[in-house]
C-alpha cells in the first residue's frame, strides 16, 4: 500500500513538474498565455515557443536517460553503470567537436549539423564497441565494459586534440556543447527525440521479465530460457541508439541515468515491472526540475544543466561508493 501511494505521487509529481516548470523563470508567465498558443503577445510566444518545448525536451531526455541507466545497471549488475558507460557520450561529443571544427552550420528538421555529427559519432562508438567484442570473441559483461572504457579514452583524447588545434571561438563552442544544454526554440528537437525514447521504453517494457532475470545473473537467466546473448545485443544496440540521439540533441548531461534509477529503487523496489515506469516518470521530472533551477538560480544568467546535474551527481556517486552493502552490519 505504501509503495502504491508513492507510485501515485511519482506520477502526479512528474506531471505537475512538466506543467508548472514552463511558467517559472526570469519572467514569470501569466496563466492567460497558456490558453493563447497563436497569440503575438510576448508572454504567449515565450511560453509556447521557448519554455514549453524546452520542458518537453527536458522531460523526454530525462526519461530516456533514467530508463537507459536502469537497463545498463541491470545488464552489468553494477550500481555505478550509466547510459554513458559504453562510450556513447564520448563518441557523440567527438562527432560534435568535428562538426564545430569543420564549421558546419546548416540545419535540417530543426536540428543543427553539429547534432547530426554527434549522432554519427554515437553510432561510430556503438559500432566500435561491438566490433571490439566480436574481434575479441568476448561478449561478456567484462569484455563490453573494457571495450567501452577503451572507446571513452580514445574519443576523449581525440576531443582534446581537436580543441587544441581549434581557434578560441570553436574551442568555446565545443566546451559549451560538452556542458549539456536544452536551449531550443520550437518543438522540432523534442519531436526528434520522442520516437526513439518511446521505442526504447516499449522494448524495455517487452523485455522487463528478462531484465529481472539478467539482474540476478546470466546463468539463472539462461536456465529460465532467456536467450542471453540475443537479449543483451538487442538491448545494447537499441538503448545505445536512444542515448546517442538524446546526447546528439542535448549534449552529454551526466548523472541522470545514475541517480534516478537508484532513487526509484528506494521508492518502488528492484522489480523492473515497477521500476521502469517509475524511472521514466521520475527521470523526466528530475531533469525538468534541474533545468528550471539551472535557468532561474542565477537569472538572468543561465547555468548549463549539465553542470547542475554534475553538482548533484558527484555527492550521490560518493554516497553509492561509501554506503554499506545491503544487510551488512556496521562494526561497533
Image (spheres, rainbow, N blue to C red):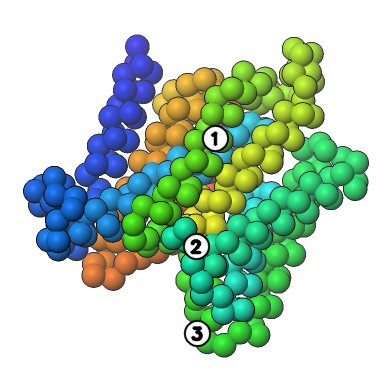
Of the 4 image quadrants, the one containing the N terminus is: top left
Residue 225 in view here: yes
Task: Looking at the picture, tell me which residue is in the foreground, 82 or 107.
Answer: 107
Task: Looking at the picture, tell me which residue is in the foreground, 252 or 100.
Answer: 100
What numbered label is drawn on residue 199?
A: 1
Q: In the image, is 268 to the left or to the right of 135? A: left
Say which residue label 3 marks. Answer: 169
Q: Quadrant of residue 62?
A: top left
Say which residue label 2 marks. Answer: 108
Precedes in sequence: disc 1 or disc 3:
3
Residue at screen point 64% across, 39% down: 238
Q: CA distance from mark 1 to mark 3?
A: 37 Å
Residue at screen point 47% across, 21% down: 274
What is the x, y in percent for residue 175? Answer: 52, 73
Q: Secondary structure at mark 1?
A: helix
Residue at screen point 61% across, 64% down: 117
Q: Secondary structure at mark 3?
A: helix
* Contact between labelled residues 3 and 1, with CB atoms less than 8 Å apart: no
Q: Image height check: is 258 above or below 201?
A: below
Which is more foreground, mark 1 or mark 3?
A: 1
Q: CA distance from mark 2 to mark 3?
A: 23 Å
Precedes in sequence: disc 2 or disc 3:
2
Which is more foreground, mark 2 or mark 1?
A: 2
Q: Image height check: is 191 above or below 46?
A: above
Label 2 crowd bin: few (<14), some (14–19), many (20+), radius 10 Å: few
Residue at screen point 87% across, 44% down: 134
Amino acid at each position: 500500500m505504501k509503495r502504491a501511494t508513492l507510485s501515485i505521487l511519482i506520477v502526479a509529481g512528474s506531471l505537475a513538474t512538466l506543467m508548472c516548470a514552463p511558467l517559472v523563470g526570469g519572467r514569470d508567465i501569466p496563466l492567460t498565455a497558456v490558453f493563447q498558443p497563436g497569440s503575438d503577445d510576448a508572454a504567449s510566444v515565450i511560453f509556447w515557443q521557448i519554455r514549453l518545448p524546452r520542458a518537453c525536451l527536458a522531460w523526454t531526455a530525462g526519461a530516456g536517460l533514467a530508463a537507459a541507466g536502469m537497463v545498463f545497471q541491470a545488464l552489468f549488475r553494477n550500481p555505478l553503470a550509466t547510459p554513458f558507460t559504453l562510450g556513447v557520450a564520448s563518441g557523440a561529443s567527438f562527432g560534435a567537436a568535428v562538426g564545430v571544427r569543420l564549421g558546419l552550420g546548416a540545419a535540417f528538421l530543426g536540428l543543427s549539423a553539429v547534432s547530426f555529427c554527434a549522432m554519427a559519432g554515437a553510432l561510430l562508438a556503438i559500432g566500435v564497441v561491438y566490433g571490439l567484442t566480436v574481434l575479441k570473441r568476448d561478449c561478456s559483461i567484462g569484455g563490453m565494459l573494457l571495450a567501452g572504457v577503451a572507446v571513452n579514452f580514445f574519443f576523449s583524447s581525440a576531443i582534446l586534440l581537436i580543441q587544441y588545434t581549434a581557434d578560441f571561438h570553436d574551442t568555446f563552442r565545443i566546451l559549451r556543447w560538452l556542458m549539456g544544454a536544452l536551449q531550443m526554440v520550437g518543438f522540432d528537437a523534442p519531436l526528434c527525440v520522442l520516437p526513439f525514447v518511446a521505442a526504447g521504453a516499449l522494448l524495455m517494457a517487452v523485455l522487463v521479465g528478462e531484465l529481472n532475470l539478467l539482474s540476478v545473473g546470466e546463468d539463472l537467466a539462461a536456465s529460465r530460457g532467456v536467450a542471453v546473448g540475443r537479449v543483451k545485443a538487442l538491448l545494447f544496440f537499441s538503448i545505445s541508439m536512444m542515448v546517442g540521439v538524446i546526447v546528439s540533441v542535448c549534449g552529454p548531461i551526466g548523472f541522470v541515468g545514475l541517480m534516478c534509477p537508484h532513487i526509484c529503487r528506494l521508492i518502488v523496489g528492484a522489480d523492473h515491472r515497477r521500476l521502469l515506469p517509475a524511472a521514466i516518470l521520475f527521470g523526466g521530472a528530475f531533469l525538468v526540475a534541474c533545468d528550471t533551477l539551472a535557468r532561474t538560480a542565477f537569472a538572468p544568467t543561465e547555468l548549463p544543466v549539465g553542470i547542475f546535474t554534475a553538482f548533484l551527481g558527484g555527492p550521490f556517486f560518493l554516497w553509492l561508493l561509501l554506503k554499506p552493502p545491503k544487510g551488512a552490519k556496521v562494526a561497533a
